[in-house]
Image: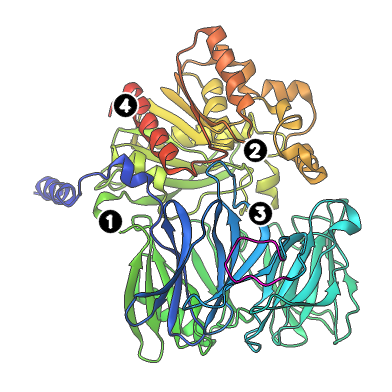
Amino acid sequence: MRQLLAALCMVLAFSSVAAPLSVAEFSRDDEFKGMKISPDGKHLAVLTPVEGKNALAILDINTMKPTYVVKFSGEKQVGQFHWANNERVILTLEKFKPWYAGSGFYGEWYAVNLDGKRREYIFGYRGADTQAGTRVKQREGFNGWGTLVDLLPENEDEILMMGTPWGGNGDARIPTLFRVNVYTGKRKTLSMAPVRNSHFVVDTKGKARFVSGISARGDVELYYRAGDEWEWTQVDAGSDSEGYFRPIAFADQNHVYAIDGRDGDTTGLYKVNMDTGERKLLFRDDTVNISDIHFGPMRREMYAVTVSPDYPNYIFVRGSHPTAKALKNLLASFPSKQVVITSQSLDGRQSIVYAFSDVDPGQYFLYDAEKNALRALVKTRAWVTEQNSGISEAIAFNARDGKTIRGYLTLPPGQTMESAKDLPMVVYPHGGPESRDYWGYDTIAQLFASRGMAVLQVNFRGSTGYGDQFEHAGRHHWGDKVQYDIIDGTRHIIERGIAKAGNICIAGASFGGYSALQSAILEPDLYACSIGMMGVYDLPMLYDEGDIPDTAWGRQGLQRRIGEDMTQLKAFSPVYHVDKLKAPVLIIHGEEDERAPIEHAEKLKAALEAERHPFRYMELNNEAHGFDDLENREKAFSEMLSFLDEHLKL
């Protein structure tokens, strides 16, 4: 009887699975992202793609009809955006080209009213000579990046902005703090920072009280001012740029909340009395660092932090804060999802809520705290349903040296950890390597899962977020210990009976592309195929090619992460060891990649040809370190599925 019931449950589960999405549907950009509400709660602003570039739609909150759409011709698109007051939005201008890695941001800011009037270029290098809008008035330009510090909600006409000059070294890169008029672009100089590469923190009244930066030696320097005079006093922040004292918000005029990693392996949240120096530890997780900070309506008062050992968890520092109470109500309304309040009206009554999960890319809601009412607004990817998505479960296992390694396993739609058995699998290590995977909807993992494959993502040693020791354990071990974690994770899933030995491929991008080749070299019988995307395959080349060695900071980072022992670097480089490979290889690379230049792919291709090893090669025109161009993305996704279909039993 029990077997009959189990069989019936399986039938019902699979009957609810929708038809898989097409490659074109997986390749599409999000339809909406980054929604924010105006201070008076009457309008919304949201990024949406128009002809392949980001535009900003400003909507009436009641009708959801646009009052204006901000878009630019040529190479410009909308980047960041914020409500400066009830009628005006400020935004960054990005230079859009499909082959740009990153935002293409050159420090330019633009402002417009919600009805499209009073369009102004308010900060940037162009000054009077700009084509951003039709009503730009002449003013002096600033040859550098503009960074928003505070919206100054008490002041409808001005914002607090930091300007960092381009180029040069030392004092040439010292930022200046300005008040900038959001209607005219006129700026008033307040103070120069005492250190370059700075970050300011304001108090509860909007006054800049802390500034931190990175010295020429790569050390963190932190400065503080107690009163109204612009006199900065250096505070002991610690010399380690990865475990320093970092103020994040003021509790009141004399007490500050700060994150500090010097007193433990993981970061802790402290409350510090700046008059006496007394420190109180409020929270520390033994496994992971604090990953996110959450602020109230004015973006100054902190009420919670997030940690994500496996699934994301809120830690409420100020549980009685009105926004904290609202979030607790919302979490109860979405028990299987992560909920984030992305913005609020200034009175805190109305909130924009973003809810997502492993099977839901995300949806925006409007929450009225006074009425305790929730209203659905838009979905980021409306064509995705929970029925055509696979669940993602947190996993943990012991590596061969006993270290605990965590990760995520995404299963084909309709499968569970109990029902999954002998599946084909793609091992999909993340880039970085000083990065990590989080629980949520992953487009590429879902692409593979939709075709019947399990997808394993391993947060190997060297990944960030699990404390200093775990992160540093990956340094100088890219080619051995890091890969053994990925290999041990693969075997763990095989031993659990979820994946079938001999029917497993490894694929990844950037450092994940390196791992896809290096792991397959170390364990040639474990993987049936290997897919390297935008990968680095010759480690010594990192010191000579690409944008990393262009700066002293980049070269220092290489020395810390991989060292300068050329014998070891060659031993860890796939291009010198393709004779050990058994897995057929697919190489995908952007011709304009500056982070991992195309020379890496070309050298790997030549080595494979010399060994007469089976491989496919795809070079993407007008593409850099990613799949920013939709057409290239669709081509690459199709090629990967074709390759997997050829080498795995699906």
Amino acid type of the residue tagged 1 in the rendering: Glu
Q: Which residue is mark 4?
A: 645
User: Residue 197's image quarter?
Assistant: bottom right
Reading the chain from its start, which is encountered first: label 1 or label 4? 1
Image disc number at residue 595: 2
Q: Quadrant of the C terminus?
A: top left
**Magenta-highlighted stretch: main secondary structure?**
loop
Of the two numbered discs 3 and 1 on the same chain, state the one appearing first in sequence: 1
Q: Label 1 near label 3: C-beta < 8 Å?
A: no
Q: Position of residue 346 (x, y in %)?
A: 53, 87
Question: Closest to the observer: 366 or 470?
Answer: 366
> What residue appears at the point 76 percent right and 29 percent down from the top-left corner?
544
Q: Quadrant of residue 644?
A: top left
How many other residues sit within 10 Å of disc 3, few (<14), some (14-19) or many (≥20)?
many
Q: Which residue is mark 3?
A: 467
Asked whether disc 3 touches disc 2, contact meaning CB atoms under 8 Å apart, the reply is: no
Q: In the rendered image of this protein, does residue 301 appear above or below residue 290?
A: below
Q: Position of residue 349 (x, y in %)?
A: 45, 88
Secondary structure under the numbered disc 3 in the rendered image: loop
Give the mark nearest the N terminus, 1 or 2.
1
Tell me the distance, in whole angstroms, between the alpha carbons under discs 1 and 2. Answer: 35 Å
Q: Secondary structure at mark 2?
A: loop
Q: Amino acid at mark 4?
A: Asp
